[in-house]
Image: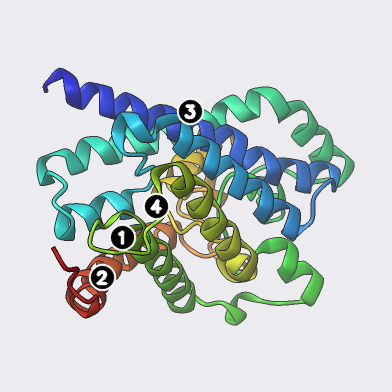
Amino acid sequence: MDSSLWKKLAGEFIGCWTLGFLGLMCVAVAIVSGGLDLFGVGIAFAFAITFAVYLTGAVGGAHLNPAVTLAFALFGGFPKKDVIPYWIAQVLGWCVGALFLYMIVGGMITAYEAAHNIVRGSIESQITAMIFNCYAPHPAFAALNHWDASVVPTWRAIVSEMFGTMMLVVMVFAFVDPKNPFRPSAGIFALIVGLVVGYLILVTSPQTMAAINPARDLGPRIATWILGWGQVSFPGPASGVGGPWYIWTVGPLLGGVLAGALWKYILLPCIPKQEA
């Protein structure tokens, strides 16, 4: 592996570690202290995305998302041989970021579980595992609205994640393609991508908690399995609200592929050619 790839992988790892810590911190604040509502979480996560892209964009391109990497490998000229190393760096970054977050707020999570008589690893412990993992439907909204698992079955959850990710990734293609005269400058790109993610969190969280990124769920899910949430993490709740773990891997990867095809074969050819 050449040194330039190692540098890019370091950038991906650090960017995903940043999101695993700062991004999920806002979910922790919302759950254990009630300090943020859905709007607050969406805006805070938008800031975290912006910070991570500004921090690492010049190093590895700030994919920070396996669906973005796959889409650009298939439709954007990204080297296919680098896809798996990027995926590994992304998942590890999110996992380590989640473990680092637990090191900071683990005491508050344990106190919350004790105060609400929650046994970690039970189906009820989704409410604390969701600081890290994604569930369908969103456990807090499910409890508030008396939803059962039939409200968002596995197939609906996969479709929600697929189309949410498709919207994110096709926007990224539009933002970076030099043939698009409306693309933002590099300095504005991070802010706009953050706003897109924040919006998608606001509108899709009740269904699937808006992972729109395989590493965002898989890395922290590995962390929660290590930390004692057991089957609530893998393979996911056997019954009731939750859904199997693969929803947030399969859905976003399919969405990334659809986004690349949508941009390359439908939207891009419709852009008028610029005069020399």
Label 2 and label 4: CA atoms lie apart by 21 Å
Q: Which residue has dot 4 on it?
A: 214
Question: As shown in the figure, which amino acid type bears the numbered disc 2?
Answer: Trp
Disc with the residue nearer the chain's start (2 vs 4): 4
Disc with the residue nearer the chain's start (2 vs 1): 1
Q: Which mark is residue 173?
A: 1
The answer to whether any part of residue 239 appears in the image is: no
Q: Residue lying furthest front in this view?
A: 276
Label 3 and label 4: CA atoms lie apart by 15 Å
Give percent across and percent down for residue 255: 34, 67
Label 2 and label 3: CA atoms lie apart by 33 Å
| 25 lies above or below 31 | above
Give percent across and percent down for residue 193: 48, 53
The answer to whether any part of residue 245 appears in the image is: yes
Contact check, label 3 and label 4, Cβ < 8 Å: no
Give the colour scheme of this rendering. Answer: rainbow
Question: As shown in the figure, which amino acid type bears the numbered disc 4?
Answer: Pro
In this picture, residue 117 sits left or right of residue 13: right
Which mark lies nearer to you, 1 or 3?
1
Contact check, label 2 and label 1, Cβ < 8 Å: yes
Which mark lies nearer to you, 2 or 4?
2
Q: Look at 54% across and 36% down and name the residue there.
A: 51
Quarter-wise, where is residue 179 in the image? Answer: bottom left
Q: Residue lying furthest top in this view?
A: 3
In this picture, residue 200 sits left or right of residue 57: right
Label 3 neighbour load within 10 Å: few <14, some 14-19, many 20+: many
Label 4 neighbour load within 10 Å: few <14, some 14-19, many 20+: many
Nearest to the observer: residue 233 or residue 94: 94
Q: Which residue has dot 2 on it?
A: 263
In this picture, residue 188 sits left or right of residue 121: left
